[in-house]
Amino acid sequence: MRINGDEERSLAGAGIASSQATTAPLDPKSSSWPQLVGMLGTDAGEALARALPGADVVLIPEGAAVTMDYRLNRVRIFVTDRSESGTVVRAPARG
């Protein structure tokens, strides 16, 4: 998972609490996941990375500039701030 274009890094074993993690499995055929709104961005990213192996999951601060190209293997997660403690502010979606 990447944070706004930073180098890819694994969150596994990073000691990040998953107290808000979704309990229902995420549908990998879906194009968006509204049930992740309100979660910590890192928790949402981990859930999506498990549901979509090989996907390019990216945390992006709300209001940041993004490219307009559409890629099915990319999922953007918009969070309240750049830090890992940012909260998901809109449904993560492919693109």
Image (cartoon, rainbow, N blue to C red):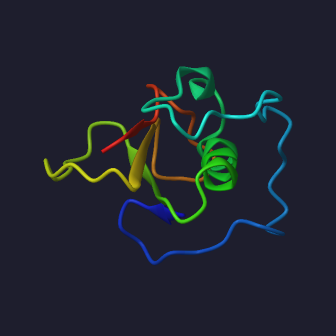
| Residue 37, quarter of picture | top right
Residue at screen point 83% across, 43% down? 18
Which residue is farthest left? Answer: 68
Residue drawn at 21 percent across, 48 percent down: 70
**Which residue is at the front of the view, 63 or 70?**
70
Residue occupying the point 61% across, 24% down: 38
* Residue 79 image point, x, y percent: 47, 38
Task: State the quadrant of the C terminus.
Answer: top left
Image position of 75 with respect to 7: above or below? above
Number of marks in picture: 0
Residue 29 vertical placement versus 52 (above, below) = above
- x and y, in percent, of residue 58 in the image: 44, 55
Q: Position of residue 52 (x, y in %)?
A: 58, 52
Task: Name the residue furthest front.
Answer: 29
Q: Residue at x 53, y 28 (%)?
A: 33
Residue 46, percent across and down? 68, 52
- Residue 94 shown left or right of residue 57 in the figure: left
Is 35 placed left or right of 80 in the picture?
Answer: right
Q: Quadrant of the N terminus?
A: bottom right
- In the image, is residue 67 above or below residue 29? below
